[in-house]
Amino acid sequence: MPLTMDKEILIRVPSSLYRRVKKLCQKDYRSISSLVRELLFEEMEETLTEEDIRILEKQSLAFHRGEGIDWRKVRRG
């Protein structure tokens, strides 16, 4: 299934970091947003195992079928 890029995030970074990232992206002829997407995907792939992803997908489907926990009803500590 192709990914749809329909969500945006606004992040604030120090000017010095922005200048360094912009310079890095200009060398590779790409946008800063493509670099951020790439880094996010890499982090997800490194952090989550295939089993973790399968569990998340299974639980997400269960939640959407109404089988998940209604966290609004869970009492806080």
Image (cartoon, rainbow, N blue to C red):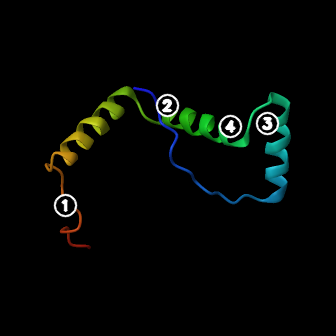
Question: Residue 40: x, y in percent?
Answer: 57, 40
Q: Are marks 3 and 2 in contact (CB under 8 Å)?
A: no
Pointer 3 residue: 25
Q: Is residue 20 above or below residue 47?
A: below
What residue is rendered at 84% in x and 45% in y? Answer: 20
What residue is rendered at 16% in x and 45% in y? Answer: 65
Q: Mark 4 or mark 3: which comes first in sequence?
A: 3
Q: Are marks 4 and 3 in contact (CB under 8 Å)?
A: yes
**Quarter of the picture holding the C terminus:** bottom left
Residue placed most toward the observer, 52 or 11? 11
Q: Which mark is residue 37?
A: none
Q: Amino acid at mark 2?
A: Glu
Q: Secondary structure at mark 3?
A: helix
Q: Mark 3 or mark 2: which comes first in sequence?
A: 3
Question: In whole angstroms, how far apart are the C-alphas of marks 4 and 2?
Answer: 15 Å
Pointer 1 residue: 70
Pointer 2 residue: 45
Q: Are marks 1 and 2 in contact (CB under 8 Å)?
A: no
Question: Residue 19: x, y in percent?
Answer: 85, 49
Question: In whole angstroms, how far apart are the C-alphas of marks 4 and 1?
Answer: 36 Å
Question: Residue 72: x, y in percent?
Answer: 23, 68
**Quarter of the picture holding the N terminus:** top left
Residue placed most toward the observer, 25 or 1? 1
Is 4 situated left or right of 24 in this image? left
Q: Amino acid at mark 1?
A: Asp
Pointer 4 residue: 35
Q: Amino acid at mark 4?
A: Leu
